[in-house]
Amino acid sequence: MRLTKVEDITQSASVLSEKLEVAIKPFLACLSIAGLRRRHIVTEEKNIGIFRQLIRWKYMFYAIIILLLLWSNFLFSLKDFASVHAFDGKLCKDIISSAWFLQVAFYAANNLVMGRHWPSFYTAWDKYAENTGTKTRSMVRKLAIFLTIVYACWVVSSCVFLTISALQTRANTTASLSLTEAIFVNIFLFTAYFYFVSTWFLLTAQFALACFMFYRAFREQYRDLKLDVEEKCSVSNTIESHRLRHDNLCRLVSQADSIFSMFIFVTVATAIPLIVFTLYFVMFETTDTFSYGATWWSVILCTVQLFVIFIGGAAVNTAAHGSLDLLYKIDLQDVPIDKLQKLTIFLSRLNARSIGFSAFDLFIIDKPTVVTFFGSILTYAIVVIQFRSCTSGSLALSSCNRTSA
């Protein structure tokens, strides 16, 4: 039966609404504003003009400019180390700031290089959702809208924080500069700070969004497998379709992992030292209330970031291996011989290498990894606290000796 024009338009709109890029459109708009979204450029034309080429590659140029700005911000922060003469609170504070700037600069560099793979990931996800009937679009869209609202609040609060900080600390910095130089420096700092906080939040939120998508997809696959396992006559006929569905999800995880590996590696490599240095600064240095609050805010941000990466990654890993217990419950007497081989392959996949996000395959984020890193952070924190106790005891003993003398 031939479709009418209205029905054809309605059907096309329905198909378009199922696409992942449409579901997360508000969040992608935030990425575009921050220069973090890579658009797939396809053209069949030849001999196009230079101006049209520049328009086609405008997003690439914008991303490169933002990347250079973030690296310039990091290099600008290194000038404070030139006047360092001892390990004190000022040096510790400079290390914390530079570590934050370095972390985000690496985020932007990785996004510029690996972000080109996102269009192919969206296409692969849409194909998987179409073939399996996965119903995660509604929840993903709600989460994308929520993250967009949180991002707007985050930018506003960060700008307020920077304004207060500038009024308290920049007066001495720009006192020796002329009015023009001071204006230029402040514009550069505010611009760099906007892209700094945007890059940090959006790429962390992007990882959280990906973890949520995979967790929901694996759980949906688990529920469908559970229904078939409970119906013994059905599982023998559908075991291969479940295996292929799970394998396709694993391929998507591997595709996303190639994009996020640098993000995870840089976060783990910098967040733990940041927490340790920040705790040292809080415990050993006397400072004003604003700096004290800002320092604890730094600890909270590091903790939240690690929480998102470890909990999100561990949730994906747990959901990906959730089918293992169900397969062990299958009564092999009800499975034909020709299906046993496929069941064995499925079991081997689940019992082999862990499935999930990694840092260049150095480690997979799973429950043991979370416990290990949490134990490391706790150990360093205890060492810092003990070091403070020893220092306080030494100072008290020294004061007592002076009094006796």
Image (tube, rainbow, N blue to C red):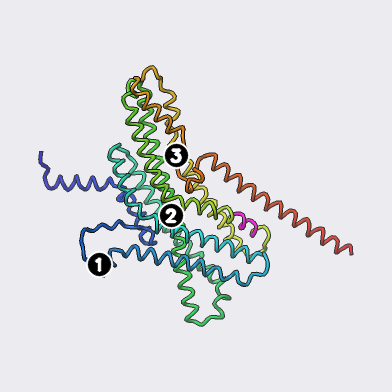
User: In the image, is residue 278 part of the stretch drawn in magenta?
Assistant: yes
What amino acid is found at the position of numbered circle 1 in the picture?
A: Arg
Q: Which residue is mark 2?
A: 203
What amino acid is found at the position of numbered circle 2 in the picture?
A: Leu
Q: Which residue is mark 3?
A: 355
Q: Is residue 141 left or right of residue 301?
A: left
Q: Position of residue 282 (x, y in %)?
A: 64, 58
Nearer-the-camera pick, 205 or 232 = 232
User: In the image, is residue 218 part of the stretch drawn in magenta?
Assistant: no
Q: Earlier in the sequence, mark 2 or mark 1?
A: 1
Residue depicted at 62% across the width and 57% down the height: 277
| 89 relative to 252, above or below | below
Q: Position of residue 340 (x, y in %)?
A: 37, 23
User: Looking at the image, is mark 2 or mark 1 nearer the viewer?
Assistant: 1
Judged by its main secondary structure, the magenta piece is: helix
Q: Earlier in the sequence, mark 2 or mark 3?
A: 2
* Secondary element at image label 1: helix
Residue depicted at 67% across the width and 64% down the height: 87
Q: Is residue 25 left or right of residue 167?
A: left
Q: Tell me the magenta residue range.
A: 275-281
Q: Which residue is mark 1?
A: 52
User: Looking at the image, is mark 2 or mark 3 nearer the viewer?
Assistant: 3
Marks 2 and 1 close (CB-CB < 8 Å): no
The number of callouts visible is 3
Q: Position of residue 194 (x, y in %)?
A: 45, 64
Nearer-the-camera pick, 187 or 87 = 87
